[in-house]
Amino acid sequence: MQRLSVFIDMSNILSAAKLKNFKIDFSKLKDYILRGRSAVRMIAYLVQLDKKANLDPFVYALRNLDYEVRIKFAQKMHDGRIKADWDIAIVVDIMAATQKLDTICLVTGDGDFISLVNYLKGQGIKVEGYAVKGPGVSRDLRLSCDEFFDITQAQSSL
């Protein structure tokens, strides 16, 4: 039985989906990624830009679909930029899980994960990439993964 976990860079895929005017159905996404397999864990990393925003309904819906949800508040930098990055935490969580997994399903188009993907493959772990296809998806990330899937294609085929 294949041991796999799903790690979702929510800010990346939600931003890409918004640019394409595409709504992600997280139930269908789960079914597409798992394809009859079972997951050890499915973690969604969310960024909350506005502390007053109520994410509860969205978080509740994700948790009902068996996603673990982690939330980080965005920080406003002195120069006005907003910093809200889960990349390091995602990498740490994946590295901590590698001894227990055969397959990592990484849901992002962010090229910052290329080194991680190459490391995992060197350890004999299969890496499946999932993203909203478009100009924001790193070509090198796509090529680094063992398989790469376009979420928009998956949603329309379910």
Image (cartoon, rainbow, N blue to C red):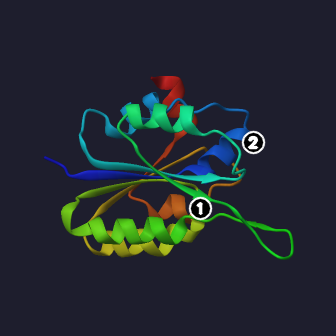
Q: Position of residue 4 (x, y in %)?
A: 27, 51
Relative to the observer, which residue lies in front, 130 or 146?
130
- Residue depicted at 55% across the width and 64% down the height: 86
Q: Residues within 10 Å of mark 2 (few under 14, many from 20)?
A: few
Element class at badge 2:
helix
Instruction: Give the labeled residue for mark 2.
Output: 19
- Residue depicted at 59% across the width and 61% down the height: 110
Is 153 located above or below residue 52 in the figure? Answer: above
Q: Position of residue 94 (x, y in %)?
A: 36, 65
Asked if the residue under mark 1 is in contact with the one under mark 2, i.e. CB atoms within 8 Å, the reply is no
Q: Residues within 10 Å of mark 1 (few under 14, many from 20)?
A: some
How far apart are labels 2 and 1 at the CA level?
A: 15 Å
* Amino acid type assigned to the residue bearing label 1 in the image: Asp
Residue 28 falls left or right of residue 38:
right
Is 135 located above or below residue 88 in the figure? Answer: above
* Amino acid type assigned to the residue bearing label 2 in the image: Leu
- Report the residue that reaches farthest toward the front: 52
Relative to the observer, which residue lies in front, 130 or 9?
9
Instruction: Give the labeled residue for mark 1.
Output: 110
Residue 153's label in the rendered image is: none
- Residue depicted at 60% across the width and 47% down the height: 13
- Residue depicted at 27% across the width and 74% down the height: 123
Relative to the observer, which residue lies in front, 157 or 13?
13
